[in-house]
Each structure stands twice: as C-alpha cells, then as structure tokens.
Image: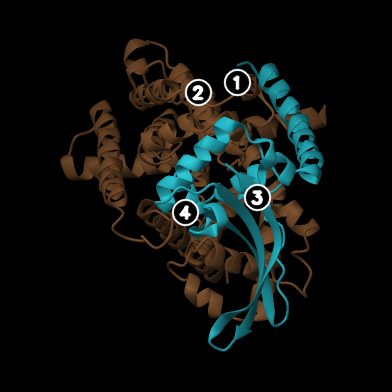
Chain colours: A brown, B cyan
C-alpha cells in the first residue's frame, strides 16, 4: 500500500504544471519542430531515398519491414504535408490532442524510412515529445480548442514524469555500453579517441576541435571519460526527484555544448525534450507581469497578449536563425549547422546564468543563516 | 486517462524499456545495427595508446577496365545525400561483407555504376570498397599519420 502511494506520488506529483505554462510549451514545441526538427534534409533527401534500389532498404525490426523498398517520392511528400499541417494545428491548438499524436506518428514514419538505409540515428525524442505531451492537455488554454470548449480540463503532469523516464533510461543506455567498452580503463582515453575519429575521418574540424586535438593531457581526457559515464548513468537516480532531474538536464546542456564545441555534434533533438522541463509557468508569469507593467492592460486580455508576445518573440528569434542557417554561410567546414550552434550555445548560456544565480542565492542564504 | 490506466501504462513501460534494451544487447552482439528505438548511442571505445591512436577508414575506389582511369573517394563523397552521421552505419550495413556485396542485384549495380559515372566523369566498370586502419602518432605539432594498412578489400563488378 505504501509502495503504491509512493509510486502514485512519483507519477502524478513529481512535476507541477499549469494550463498557461503548457500552452507556452505547446507553442514553443510546435515552432521548434516546424523550423528545425522536421526529419530529413528536404525534398532532395526524400527524392534520393525514393531513388535508392531495394538492395539498400534495411529497415529496423518493426512495421516498416512489410515494405520491400523505399516508397515513391509522392508518399514522402504526402507524409511531410500531413506533418506540416498537424504541426500548424498543434501550434494553434486545434484538435490539439489528435494533432499532437499525428505529428508524432508522421515524424516516426519519416524517421523510419530515413533510418531504413541501415543506420538509425537516435532521435526518437522528437516524435516522443508531441505524443506524450498530447496527454498533458496542453491545448486547453490559448488555443482554438479553448475557444470552442466551455469546460477546461485540468493539466496533467504525469506526461512529464513519463518523458523524464524515457530520457533517463535512454541516457543510461548511452552510459552502460561505455563501461563495457572500456571507457573506465585508465590506459585508454575514449573521449579523445572519438575526437580523433570525428576530426580525421568525418572531418568535423570546426570551433574548438583543432585545439582539442592538440591538447594531449591524459588526466584531462580520462577525467572526461569518467564524468561522461557518471553523468549518463546518474540520470536514472535523478529520476526520483524533479529538482535532481532538472539539475541533470542542466548538466546535459553543458555536456552537449562541450561535445558541439569539440566533436561538432550538437544533438539538437534532445533539446526538445529538455525544454519540456523548463519552468513554463514561471516564464508565463514573467512575460505577463512585464506586459502588464509596460502596457497597463490587465485581466484576461493581458494573459492572451502575453502568449502572443511570447509566440512572436520565439518566431522573431527562430526565423532569422533558420534563414541564416539555410544560407550555409557559416560553419561550412563541418556538417554542424548554424542554427544548431546558435540554439545549443543559447541553451548553454541560459543554463550557466540560471546556475550562477542559484549558486549565488544559496551562498547568500548561508551567509544570512550565519 | 484515469489514474489506473496511467499507472498501468507506467508499469508496462517500466517492464518494456529494460526488455528492449536486452534485445539491443542480443542484436548488438551479432550486428551493430539496427538498434531498437529507445536508446541513445553508446559509442564504443576507440583505440588510443600512450603515444598515438588508430582509426579505421573506408575508401571507395572506382575504375575502368585495366585501371586505365580510377578515382578514390570517401563514402561521403560517393553518397553526398546521406547525412554524415549515417554514412558509417550505411557503409557497414551494405558494404562491409563480401558475400552481401556480391548479392547486390543488377538494378543495384546499375544504380551504383550510374552514380560512379556521374561523380568520376568516366565510365567505371568496377568498384572497390577498401577498409584501412590508419596509425597516427602524437607529436608536438599535432597528430601525424604514421602508417596506413589495408585490412579488407571488396570488389564489385558492375
């Protein structure tokens, strides 16, 4: 009985959410996927897959095995169109639950075919986020649904716990084979080895990669091997408390920033999942209070306008980054995209500022107690 | 969803996740790909010694009869449409085993020949997939290639 209570408490009370915060998250997620995380590299990529002979069709075990080869380009175009429409529906909050699930399924189909060339990239969090969050009622405020329905359902926080479970488990699966693969062996430096591999074979030589290749300090590289494993395995433990999990999400952002700077790998899809664990209620309150302060408008109107302001700000930041990134004017010597660099760096700066603030607050509190 | 359904969902997922990971272990033991969905990449260790390191590289060589004309290139040059992150897995899945390569259909061979012709600018009739192990030495000026050793060569006649 006690276990059941604790289990229930973990599922239903680990994270707290509000309909307003969830609305902001829904808008952010829709725009993030729409502009940066739609699978594939455009119609040219789909055209290439459609042209591949059946010899190169190697789907993972699962439903895509019912096909003998890649589908024609028209199927890719159809699924892509469905994805874009469902993303817009999710953004507007129109039949939000169905739109979110359809978004996830469309992404799964596209990813499934893209990965059927014999290499699976680990980007399952992109479809996972809209599918899981569909059940949080994130479309019941500041949405077309909220205008059509009289009764507003309570927000659900268990989808966040479920997503945390997936992220923590997947992090664990990244750490565990490293232990078996000899990462803890002090006579070999695995992180440094991967750096060489990325630098010389894949020619990922941008940002700090050149400096890192020349930095030959055994203790430093071995320490990185150990820290990587501790961080990845530790995610499972962090699952038991929301504050610990958020701390590990912060570590993850720092980790991905460092891998981007040295290995030129950004892991941008993971950031979609990390963003779910931001304090969206706090973000909503801050934007709303600032809006009230500057405009003098209060009441329901101020809430609506705060959400519109947030959507506009996100678009204003995302659109130029997307357009500049598409021009390929920077970072052309690596496959790292400009938008990946900007977004991961911004996330890192955000985490660094929040981290310093929290540390400063903790130090001040200690001083006061003394 | 009511509380009971959510609880059941969590229990199912808590059972399913380790189970699918056990499958990763079995599949991964025999073959590097494909992986089940709910994992992140583990990155096995790379050989780094006190004074150097070794790296495995794949080279694609296309040539005409009697090697009158030939061209060496990296897999990413031969398949530029495939994202760099997928290239090693794609090559490992389709071009690392001689038996599998020889089973490529006539359609597949014709497709590869068309591609080789487009890229090289001549009409090759043979393609080689060459695996090299490169040994690098750490010096004060950075890493220097010490030696490259061919470890495997697969021939595909178009």
Nearer the observer, disc 3 or disc 4?
3
Image spot of residue B12 (x, y percent): 74, 25
Q: Earlier in the sequence, mark 3 or mark 4?
A: 4
- Element at label 4: helix
Is A16 on the left or on the right of A228, as rendered? left
Residue closer to the observer: A36 or B90: B90
The span from disc 4 to disc 2 (Cα, nearest Å) is: 25 Å
What is the number of the mark on residue B77?
Answer: 4
The span from disc 2 to disc 1 (Cα, nearest Å) is: 8 Å
At 41% across and 59% down in the image, what residue appears? A345
Q: Which residue is mark 2?
A: A71
- Asked if marks 2 and 1 touch (Cβ < 8 Å), the reply is yes
What is the number of the mark on residue A158?
Answer: none
Evaluate whether residue A38 shows in this view.
Answer: no
Image spot of residue B109 (x, y percent): 56, 37
The span from disc 3 to disc 4 (Cα, nearest Å) is: 19 Å
Which chain is mark 1 on?
A: A
Q: Which residue is mark 3?
A: B155
Image spot of residue B126 (x, y percent): 57, 49
Q: Which residue is mark 1?
A: A67
Tag 1 and tag 3 share a subunit: no
The span from disc 2 to disc 3 (Cα, nearest Å) is: 29 Å
Name which quarter of the figure residue A35 lies in: top left
Residue closer to the observer: A100 or A341: A341
At 63% across and 33% down in the image, what residue appears? A58
- Asked if marks 3 and 4 touch (Cβ < 8 Å), the reply is no
Which chain is mark 4 on?
A: B
User: Is disc 2 surrounded by few (<14), some (14 to 19) or many (20+) residues within 10 Å?
Assistant: some
Image spot of residue A207 (x, y percent): 43, 68
Is A226 on the left or on the right of A19, as rendered? right
């Amino acid at each position: 009985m006690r276990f059941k209570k604790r289990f229930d408490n973990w599922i239903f009370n680990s994270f707290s959410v509000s309909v307003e915060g969830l609305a902001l998250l829904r808008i952010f997620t829709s725009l993030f996927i729409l502009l940066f995380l739609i699978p594939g590299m455009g119609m040219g990529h789909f055209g290439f897959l459609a042209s591949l002979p059946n010899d190169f069709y190697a789907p993972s075990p699962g439903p895509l095995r019912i096909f003998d080869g890649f589908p024609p380009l028209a199927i890719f175009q159809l699924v892509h169109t469905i994805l874009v429409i469902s993303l817009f529906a999710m953004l507007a909050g129109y039949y939000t639950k169905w739109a979110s699930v359809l978004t996830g399924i469309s992404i799964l189909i596209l990813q499934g075919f893209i990965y059927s060339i014999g290499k699976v990239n680990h980007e399952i969090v992109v479809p996972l986020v809209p599918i899981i969050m569909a059940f949080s009622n994130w479309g019941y405020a500041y949405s077309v649904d909220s205008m059509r329905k009289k009764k507003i359902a309570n927000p659900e926080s268990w989808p966040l716990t479920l997503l945390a479970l997936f992220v923590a488990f997947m992090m664990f699966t990244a750490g565990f084979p490293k232990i078996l693969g000899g990462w803890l062996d002090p006579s070999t430096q695995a992180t440094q080895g991967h750096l060489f591999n990325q630098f010389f074979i894949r020619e990922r030589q941008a940002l700090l990669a050149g400096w890192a290749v020349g930095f030959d300090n055994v203790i430093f590289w071995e320490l990185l091997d150990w820290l990587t494993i501790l961080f990845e395995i530790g995610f499972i433990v962090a699952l038991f408390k929301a504050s610990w999990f958020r701390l590990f999400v912060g570590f993850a952002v720092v980790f991905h920033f460092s891998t981007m700077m040295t290995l030129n790998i950004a892991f941008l899809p993971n950031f979609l999942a990390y963003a779910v664990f931001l304090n969206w209620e706090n973000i909503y309150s801050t934007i709303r209070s600032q809006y009230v302060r500057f405009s003098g408008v209060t009441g329901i109107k101020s809430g609506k306008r705060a959400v519109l302001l947030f959507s506009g700000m996100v678009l204003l930041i995302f659109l130029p980054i997307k357009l500049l990134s598409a021009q390929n004017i920077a970072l052309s010597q690596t496959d790292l995209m400009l938008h990946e660099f900007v977004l991961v760096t911004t996330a890192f700066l955000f985490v660094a500022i929040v981290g310093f603030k929290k540390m400063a607050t903790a130090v001040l509190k200690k001083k006061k107690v003394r | 969803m009511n509380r009971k359904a959510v609880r059941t969902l969590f229990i199912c997922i808590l059972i399913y996740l380790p189970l699918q990971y056990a499958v990763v272990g079995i599949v991964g033991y025999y073959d590097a790909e494909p992986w089940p969905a709910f994992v992140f990449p583990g990155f096995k260790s790379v050989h780094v010694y006190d004074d150097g390191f070794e790296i495995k590289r794949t080279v694609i060589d296309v040539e005409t009869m009697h090697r009158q004309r030939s061209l060496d290139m990296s897999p990413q040059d031969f398949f530029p449409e495939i994202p760099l992150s997928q290239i090693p897995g794609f090559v490992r899945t389709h071009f690392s085993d001689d038996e599998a390569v020889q089973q490529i259909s006539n359609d597949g061979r014709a497709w590869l020949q068309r591609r080789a012709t487009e890229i090289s600018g001549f009409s090759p009739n043979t393609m080689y997939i060459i695996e090299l192990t490169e040994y690098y030495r750490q010096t004060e000026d950075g890493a220097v290639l010490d030696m490259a050793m061919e470890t495997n060569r697969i021939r595909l006649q178009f």
